[in-house]
Every structure is written in structure tokens, then in C-alpha cells.
Image (spheres, rainbow, N blue to C red):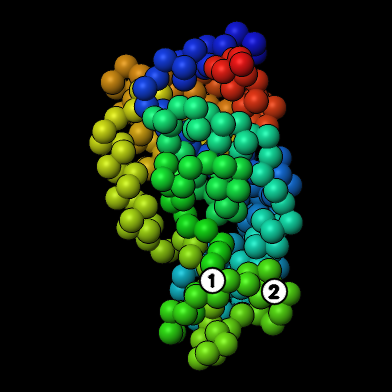
Amino acid sequence: MHQAIRRVADALREAERTLIITGAGLSADSGLPTYRGVSGLYNGTTEDGLPIEAALSGPMLQHDPALCWKYLAEIGRACLNGHPNAGHRAIARLQRRHLGCWVLTQNVDGYHLAAGSPPDRLIEIHGTLAPLYCMNCRRRDDVLATRLTGPLPPRCEYCAGVLRPPVVLFEEPLPSAALAQLQAQVARGFDAVLAIGTSASFAYIVEPLLRVQQAGGFTAQIDPMVSELSGQVDVHLMAGASDVLPQLIRHIFPD
């Protein structure tokens, strides 16, 4: 493991442009269930007899906002009760020292920003849990924590419309601005890609990795589990992100 960590550290030190892709596995050490953990709590169907993909979907928010918000609130409470961990802080440190380092995250918990990652090099491709906004009049609502303790779905104080977070639900498109930013950076090219706590389930994760490989760059994964991605990268560090990332950063910046 030590040699593998050093190999990843050497590659990241030499890279002019690095992309770090993070998934729910990174926030697992903050006490959050992984995405499959959130949906996997119901193993096939929720207690309402629906797949989580149906319960947490755009159409469900329109058709039955109370049911959709039942599960949105579960995720929201978990995120608000947690904090950035050593992995988030290590990534933020790397970004502050390495101006060519970008973060693409699938997470909606806001922990990268809270840990100090520069917002201009952070792509939250699935959006964030806050601030809420009204689906009717589009007014902004900044009291997510209060809304999660009140009746569901939360409603706008001005027009009584249903509030929602700016997250990407199932059957909804990715936010155009975030997607355009990602595409622009991928087009510029990266020398190294490090995937943390995520699988190869989405094209926007696989494409940057494949492009770097085709250009002769370096790819690595940090995940205690084996996934489809594991067989595609140069190095797979089978460990928790909050354990490995601080070690990795110490190798890159020993001071």
C-alpha cells in the first residue's frame, strides 16, 4: 500500500492539470450513507413500495411532493448532521497548493466548499441541497434546517408553492452550466484523474478517465470496494478516503 500511495503521489505532483472525481464514498466517513446506502436502505423498494429511483424522481416531486420530500428530507438531515472529514480537507489542501486541480463531485452535501475547496474549481454536477427555491414563484428560501423539521413538503411563504432543493433528481437532466463547465475542462485535457468513492456508472465519469488514459496520463481510484472502475485505472488504493488522502497529500507536500 505504501508504494502504491507513493506512486499516486508522484503522479499527482508531476501533473499540471488534475481532476479529482468524488462520490458518496468520500462522505461515508462523515457519517453519511453512500448513495447506494441511502437507496440501499430499502433494498429494492422503499417502505412505500416504490424503487428509490421512482420516489426520488422529478416526476414524483411533481405528482406527489410529500412522498418525494420524505426521502429528500432523510438525505438532507443526514447531510446537515455531518461535517467534512479529513478526506475533504486533504483535497482542499491539494487544490489550494495545486492551481491546476479541479474537483468534480456527485455529492450534494456541500462538504467540499465547507472544507475550503475553491468554488471556481469545483463542479457540483448533481447540484446541492441548499438553498431551496419555490417551484412556482422561484423565490429563494435559505432555511433548509428549519424546513426539514416542519411539515413536508415545505411550502413557500409567499405563494404556498412547493419548495425544492437545486439537486438533480432521477429522470432530470444535469444542470447545463455545470455540464458545460465540465465539458470545457475535459476538452482542455487533464494529466491525471483520481476517482474517490465512486463507480463508473456515469458517462461523465468514464469519459475524462478514458481521455486521460488515451493521452498517456495517469488514473487512480481510492475505494475500499472493487467496482467496474477498479479494472480500468493504473492504481487502485483499497482503503477509506479519509485514511489515504491525508497520507497522499503529505507525500506530495511534505512541509
Count up the numbered dots.
2
Quadrant where the N terminus sits is: top right
Read off the residue under disc 1. Answer: 132
- From the viewer's perspective, is residue 173 above or below residue 49? above
Q: Secondary structure beneath disc 2? A: helix
- From the viewer's perspective, is residue 174 above or below residue 48? above
Read off the residue under disc 2. Answer: 146
Image x and y of residue 71, in percent:
64, 67
Comparing 196 with 172, the one in front is: 196
Which numbered disc covers residue 89? none
Quadrant where the C terminus sits is: top right
Q: Residue at x 46, y 61 (%)?
A: 168
Judge whether residue 120 can be spotted in this image: yes
Of mark 2 and mark 1, the one earlier in the sequence is 1
Comparing 228 with 205, the one in front is: 205
- From the viewer's perspective, is residue 109 above or below residue 182? below
* Mark 1 burial class by Cα count in 10 Å: few <14, some 14-19, many 20+: many
- Judge from the rendering whether residue 80 lies leftward or rightward of residue 24; answer left or right: right
* Mark 2 burial class by Cα count in 10 Å: few <14, some 14-19, many 20+: few
Q: Residue at x 72, y 51 (%)?
A: 82
Give the residue type that dot 1 points to.
Leu
Q: Residue at x 43, y 84 (%)?
A: 137
Residue located farthest toward the front when viewing the structure as drawn: 255
Give the residue type that dot 2 points to.
Thr
Between the residue at mark 2 and the residue at mark 1, the CA separation in whole angstroms equals: 11 Å
Q: Residue at x 32, y 16 (%)?
A: 216
Judge whether residue 28 can be spotted in this image: no
Q: Quadrant of residue 93?
A: top right
Q: Quadrant of residue 130?
A: bottom right
Comparing 166 with 61, the one in front is: 166
